Image (tube, helix red, strand yellow):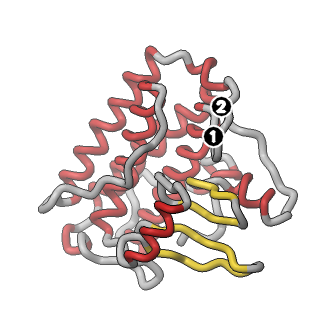
C-alpha cells in the first residue's frame, strides 16, 4: 500500500494513494513526492521519521541522526538479510497480504530494495526523490526480486566505496522537509530494518523459520519499532 497519514485533531487517518484517487490528488496537492508520509497540521513528514513525528505531536523525544559511516553498513547488512528472507518466500505468497494492508508481498519485497536503490542514486546525483515508488516487474517471482536485491546491494557498496560520506553530514538546503544526506541515510536504515522485520514476521506466520535471522537486539534500538505494521 502506498499511503500517507493525515491528522484531524489528535487522531490519524490512513490515506491509500494506490486505491483512492482522491487521496492521490490530496498527496500531490500537498507536494508529497515520496511515500510513506505523515501530514500534521501544515507540516509534511516523509519517510520513516519517528524523530520528526514525535516532535510535531509533542512527545518531546529525539534521538541523534546516525552517522553515515555507521548507517551505510547497517543498510548493507539489512539488505543482505532481506535478500535471504525474500529467497525463502514461497511464490504462493506473491499476492498474499496481511489484513491490515492491501500491498501484496510481491510489492512489499520489491519496495524494500527499490527505495534503497532510488535513495542512493539520488544521493549520488545530488537530487531528491521525484517519483512514486516503483512497482515489481510483472510476473516477477521472489527469486527474481531477491536477484534484484543483490544488484541493489552491489549498487550501495560501489557507491559507498567512492562517496564522500563525511560530506553528507552537511546541513540540507532550506525548504520543506529538506534533509541532509546523513538524515536520509538514517531514515533509510530504519525503513529497511523495519521491512526486514516484517518479512521475518510473514515467514513465521507461514511456518517458515527465517534463515540467518538477525534478532531485534542486533539492531540499534531506535530502528526497532514495537508495532511491525
Q: Nearer the viewer, residue 135 or 69?
A: 135
Identify whether 6 is placed above or below 67: below
The reply, left or right, for residue 211 in relation to residue 45 is left
Residue 109, numbered label: none
Identify whether 64 is placed above or below 18: above
Label 2 and label 1: CA atoms lie apart by 6 Å
Give coordinates of residue 59: x percent, y percent. Answer: 84, 63
The reply, left or right, for residue 70 in relation to residue 79 is right
N-terminal-most mark, 2 or 1: 2
Identify whether 152 is placed above or below 59: above
Give coordinates of residue 47: x percent, y percent. Answer: 56, 53
Quickly name the residue at label 1.
178
Q: Which residue does the image show at 54% across and 16% down from the upper left?
A: 164
Quickly name the residue at label 2.
172
Q: Can residue 149 be seen from the camera position used here?
A: yes
Q: Quadrant of the N terminus?
A: bottom left
Q: Which residue does the image show at 69% across and 58% down from the upper left?
A: 43
Amino acid at each position: 500500500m502506498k499511503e500517507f497519514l493525515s491528522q484531524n485533531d489528535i487522531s490519524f487517518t490512513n490515506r491509500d494513494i494506490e486505491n483512492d484517487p482522491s487521496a492521490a490528488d490530496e498527496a500531490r496537492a500537498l507536494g508529497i513526492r515520496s511515500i510513506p508520509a505523515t501530514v500534521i497540521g501544515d507540516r509534511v513528514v516523509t519517510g520513516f521519521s519517528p524523530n520528526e513525528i514525535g516532535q510535531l505531536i509533542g512527545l518531546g523525544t529525539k534521538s541523534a541522526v546516525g552517522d553515515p559511516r555507521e548507517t551505510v553498513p547497517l543498510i548493507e547488512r539489512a539488505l543482505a538479510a532481506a535478500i535471504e528472507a525474500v529467497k525463502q518466500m514461497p511464490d504462493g505468497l506473491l499476492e498474499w497480504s496481511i489484513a491490515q494492508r492491501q500491498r501484496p508481498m510481491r510489492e512489499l519485497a520489491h519496495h524494500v530494495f527499490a527505495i534503497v536503490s532510488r535513495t542512493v542514486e539520488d544521493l549520488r546525483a545530488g537530487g531528491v526523490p521525484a517519483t512514486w515508488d516503483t512497482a515489481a516487474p510483472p510476473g516477477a517471482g521472489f527469486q527474481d526480486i531477491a536477484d534484484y536485491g543483490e544488484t541493489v546491494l552491489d549498487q550501495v557498496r560501489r557507491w559507498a566505496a567512492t562517496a564522500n560520506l563525511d560530506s553528507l553530514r552537511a546541513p540540507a538546503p532550506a525548504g520543506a522537509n529538506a534533509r541532509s544526506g546523513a538524515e536520509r541515510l538514517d531514515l533509510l536504515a530504519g525503513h529497511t530494518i523495519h521491512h526486514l522485520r516484517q518479512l521475518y514476521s510473514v515467514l513465521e506466520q507461514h511456518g517458515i523459520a527465517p534463515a540467518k535471522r538477525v534478532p531485534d537486539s542486533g539492531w540499534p534500538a531506535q530502528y526497532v519499532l514495537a508495532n511491525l505494521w
